[in-house]
Amino acid sequence: MLRHILHPVSTAAGHTRRQLWVAASSADTCLAAAASQCTKTIAAAVRQKARDAASPATCFALVSQTYSAAEIDRLSASLTQQLAHATGQHCSISGTIVDQIIGSRGTAAGLSLLFHRPERGQSNHPFYIGDQHGRQRLREVAVGRWHTAATDRFKTQQAATTTWQPGSSSVTRAASHLELPPELQAINDPSAVHLVLFAADKETRQVLDALDARFPRAAKLGIVGAQTPFVNGREFTLLASSNGGNAIYESGVVGVAFSDATGGHELVPQVTYRGLVPVSDVLRIERCKGNVVLELEHGDRAHSLIAALRRPPTETGSATDTDGRLFARVLRTRDAHAALVFQVTGGNPAKGGLALDTLRDLSPGSFVQLMMLSRHQPEPQPSAGASGTQPQIHFGVAGGCRVACPRAGAQVVGAATEGGFCYGGPMPVDSPT
């Protein structure tokens, strides 16, 4: 079980700033009633209406697919009106349909909202990125799916722009041709953007690459929406409203870039991989190319990986206690505590070749350990660093796994979907790339 927690913390020299973030959730079976309850919670927290706001407020909405298509279609317009009346300022809406929401009481069906009201020096920038911006559907081609020039709108639009010359760079660092929308291009100081929060379909890699290039100092956190063909006939349902208009997109990315010229925000990310158990020793990577491990240390030790996969992990007791998927834990040193975990998507472990699901280039001299997901997961623990005055953003992966419970009394907004979430950490100031 993989989950991500983000704590937006507002600080200023010598004093604590007023609460600008508000989380609200409701498990009411009527979506209109749930929206009304959440709006009242936000209005009570804001306490006073804005008068001369420099930038509109924004609300990030996550709604479970237990509601009807008609209720979901009306949600953006309803929230826009209710929040404008409750807070005294226009509010843009971004969000998506999810499998489960995560609130202060754990996972449930319902509605979860994150409201942000900017103050002086701050601004919110809602955006939508779709096919018209050059986004390519890299995951669309699959076994058993046939594409023709007549039906594949991408083949004619993007074939000429997809170029990569062998030897010039690695595949994982191939140039991106995606153009960010004017709402993001118009931001005068990209370094002031500290958080990009978004909801998307499963095609997020190219978008993350473009956001990293434009906003290297920002944390990028997004949830992959639930597929909704049996809810409303759409593959995905992405909600958006800004400048007085409401829209529902079937594909693309909707979100908000949060900018703060005062530098008064601190983000505390925490990524955990609950339930993964090791099935091999920690081995040094001798040779690699891009996202592929070509050779592990000591040659014949690579064969131990095959033997390890045939043995059940010691933490479980039987081979049926794992779901069969293979993951790789990548470390900088053999004894490092911090690590990244990627799913193994192909290769031949017997020869030391492993293909990892990552855009990041692997480095010779780093270390890797194979892991599998145990069905016997430890009891969820309250997250560390929780605060009752600032909300936590919880995103997780659904599919029979329980999401860790938040600390009692904390404001929580979040969701779990089968598609999971995307996270890109801010790059170091002195990073050469």
Image (cartoon, rainbow, N blue to C red):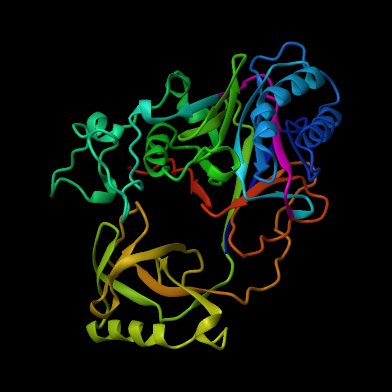
Query: Quick check: 177 above or below 317?
Result: above
Extreme-top residue of the structure: 52
- Is 206 one of the magenta-colored residues? no
Q: Is residue 279 above or below residue 16?
A: below
Magenta range is 107-125
Q: Is residue 336 left or right of residue 393?
A: left
Q: Is the magenta stretch mostly helix, strand or loop?
A: strand
Image point (83%, 27%), residue name: 43
Q: Which residue is drawn at 73% across and 61% down?
A: 382
Is residue 342 left or right of 30 when viewed as pictured? left
Task: Depth check: give the residue in front, 240 or 32.
Answer: 32
- Residue 235: percent from the left, percent from the top? 49, 41
Question: Is 119 within the magenta?
Answer: yes
Looking at the picture, how far across and down is residue 427, in whole percent? 44, 43
* Left or right: 322 in relation to 369: right
Give residue 193's position: percent from left, percent from top.
Answer: 52, 30
Q: Height in image: 167 above or below 71?
A: below
In the image, taking residue 422 as reference, residue 305 lies left or right, namely: left
Q: Give the residue drawn at x 45%, y 18%.
A: 186
- In the image, residue 268 lies at what x, y percent? 62, 48
Q: Pick whichever, 70 or 253, lies toward us.
A: 70
For the N terminus, the image quarter is bottom right
Q: How many marks?
A: 0
Kindly identify the residue that appears in the image at 64 percent across and 32 percent down.
264
> Which quadrant of the structure image shows residue 176?
top left
Figure quadrant of residue 110: top right
